[in-house]
Image: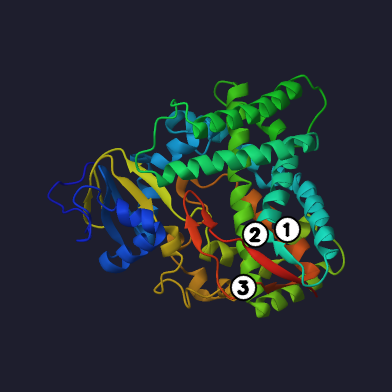
């Protein structure tokens, strides 16, 4: 429904450049610029990137309106067009009827009961990494981000394709890194050059995409010729049929969904696990509470599926890390028509940014919001918080389909790796944030291992 044009636009800063808008400040410090504007202008404000109109939101009620109540008026914004260059038309980037069809086809594969069959692979890989860490000498410095990128890549490869792709993991990992860096570079550039230009960076992008395509299409082709059952995500996606038409995904659609699972289910989980170990290293009191629970629930055995409900404090640690350092730190939407939010007029073709990082740290919504305090998740205030005061996986119809997969994976990883180890901070300084498509760190995320 179109909004009355008599409404005023959300407030804007007086510090905006007459031609480039907020681009100069955004390029210097994207997250700092957003946070300072929220302090200056409130929970909804306008900005401009050259000709691109922005509205930034940090109010849970308005977040709910965009993601859920009036979601039909908002599609994914320009950052997803960049991801589409190599992800294709998967669940993360597709829109409208095609997205809805793909969501219906993929949804059964991510049902809790189907995910339970993947738990063994998650646990096994987690225990392999735990044994590696347990053999490290005391005072060994661990680059936890690199370690988590490796182990989550192995987990997503096994759960997606069973055990027959281990030889391809280095190729996929290397090229996904190149594609991710390419996407991040284009996000930083307000006027990126067209991808058809044969620049060295564009040529490297094409080679990386083709290399991954060869692996994925090869696996899909080989799988179509198999008669025996495979208990993995690829088989679940290949077996899925549209309830109305009986149609299944073709090879291109399967490739796009596999790429999406690799990217969305790999780096975001690795980032969260990296921040968890960083936070634990700076909070020995939390480590001790976590160790008590792991000893009571697990003792000396590996985790099992039934432990998920019993590892309550372990889940609090994960939720608290996702609150402070959500990998999806901002969600972008584009208004398809005029609208009104919070009594302000939203023009058509406005990029609406939902700033999860800021909402997760608002002092009126969270006690001691800047602190790493997992115990908060047992308090009544958190239990009664507004629904969209916390949305690390988005919300509404486009809630991340892999949220339960990620939470299961992180619980097993944390339980396995934290049970036999203590972690100490290497540096008193917190890593500098690099907020692009995901919330990365500009500095290495390292901890020092000590025997428990």
C-alpha separation, residue under disc 3 versus residue under disc 2: 18 Å
Q: Work out how far the residue at label 1 is from the one at label 2, CA to CA, in angstroms.
A: 8 Å
Residue 99 placement (x, y as % from top left): 49, 33
* Crowd band around label 2 with a 10 angstrom C-alpha radius: few (<14), some (14–19), many (20+): many
**Residue 10: x, y in percent?**
22, 56
Q: Earlier in the sequence, mark 3 or mark 2?
A: 2
Q: Are marks 1 and 2 in contact (CB under 8 Å)?
A: yes
- Residue for badge 3: 427
Within 10 Å of the Cα at label 1, are there few (<14), some (14-19), or many (20+) other Cα atoms? many
Q: Is residue 33 left or right of residue 151?
A: left
Q: Left or right of 149: which side holds 268?
A: left
The quarter in which the C terminus is drawn is bottom right
Task: Determine the image quadrant of residue 256.
Answer: top right
Q: Horizontal placement of 214 versus 357: left or right?
A: right
Q: Which residue is mark 2?
A: 273
Of labels 1 and 3, earlier in sequence is: 1
Residue that mark 1 sits on: 413
* SS for dot 3: loop
Res. 353 visible in picture: yes
Q: Quadrant of residue 62?
A: bottom left
Q: Does the CB distance between marks 1 and 3 fall below 8 Å?
A: no
Direction bottom: furthest residue: 285
Choose between 359 and 280: the one closer to the eye: 280
- Residue pictured at 78% horizontal, 47% vertical: 121
Separation of disc 1 and disc 3 at Cα?
24 Å
The residue most toward the left is 6
For label 3, the crowd category at 10 Å Cα-Cα, with few meaning under 14, some 14 to 19 and many 20 or more, is: few
**Residue 309 seen by the camera:** no
Q: Residue furthest front?
A: 200
| First in sequence: mark 1 vs mark 2 | 2
Q: Residue 207: give x, y in percent of width and height.
A: 59, 28
């Amino acid at each position: 429904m179109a909004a009355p044009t008599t409404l005023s636009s959300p407030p804007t800063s007086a510090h905006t450049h007459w031609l480039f808008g907020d681009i100069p400040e955004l390029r210097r410090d994207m997250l700092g610029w957003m946070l300072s504007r929220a302090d200056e202008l409130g929970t909804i404000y306008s900005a401009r990137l050259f000709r691109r109109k922005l509205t930034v939101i940090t109010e849970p009620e308005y977040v709910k309106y965009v993601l859920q109540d009036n979601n039909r008026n908002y599609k994914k914004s320009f950052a997803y067009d960049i991801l589409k260059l190599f992800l294709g038309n998967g669940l993360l980037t597709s829109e409208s009827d095609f997205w809805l069809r793909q969501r219906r086809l993929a949804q059964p594969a991510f049902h809790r009961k189907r995910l339970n069959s993947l738990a063994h692979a998650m646990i096994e890989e987690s225990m392999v990494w735990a044994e590696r860490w347990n053999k490290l000498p005391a005072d060994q410095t661990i680059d936890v981000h690199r370690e988590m990128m490796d182990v989550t890549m192995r987990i997503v490869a096994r759960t997606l394709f069973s055990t027959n792709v281990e030889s391809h993991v280095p190729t996929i990992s290397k090229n996904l890194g190149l594609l991710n860096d390419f996407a991040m570079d284009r996000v930083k550039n307000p006027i990126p050059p067209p991808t058809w230009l044969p620049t060295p960076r564009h040529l490297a992008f094409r080679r990386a995409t083709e290399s991954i395509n060869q692996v994925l299409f090869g696996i899909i082709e080989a799988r179509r010729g198999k008669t025996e059952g495979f208990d993995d995500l690829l088989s679940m996606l290949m077996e899925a049929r549209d309830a109305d038409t009986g149609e299944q995904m073709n090879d291109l659609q399967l490739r796009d969904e596999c790429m999406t699972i690799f990217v969305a289910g790999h780096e975001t989980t690795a980032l969260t696990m990296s921040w968890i170990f960083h936070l634990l290293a700076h909070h020995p009191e939390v480590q001790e509470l976590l160790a008590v629970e792991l000893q009571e629930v697990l003792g000396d055995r590996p985790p099992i599926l039934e432990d998920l409900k019993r590892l309550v404090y372990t889940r609090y640690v994960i939720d608290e890390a996702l609150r402070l350092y959500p990998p999806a730190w901002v969600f972008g939407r584009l208004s398809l028509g005029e609208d009104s939010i919070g009594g302000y007029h939203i023009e058509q073709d406005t990029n609406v940014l939902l700033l999860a990082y800021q909402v997760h740290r608002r002092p009126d919504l969270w006690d001691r919001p800047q602190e790493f305090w997992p115990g908060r998740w047992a308090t009544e205030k958190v239990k009664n918080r507004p629904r969209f005061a916390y949305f690390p996986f988005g919300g509404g119809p486009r809630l991340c389909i892999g949220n339960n997969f990620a939470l299961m994976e992180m619980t097993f990883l944390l339980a396995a790796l934290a049970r036999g180890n203590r972690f100490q901070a290497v540096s008193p300084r917190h890593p500098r944030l690099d907020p692009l498509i995901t919330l990365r760190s500009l500095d290495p995320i390292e901890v020092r291992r000590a025997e428990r």
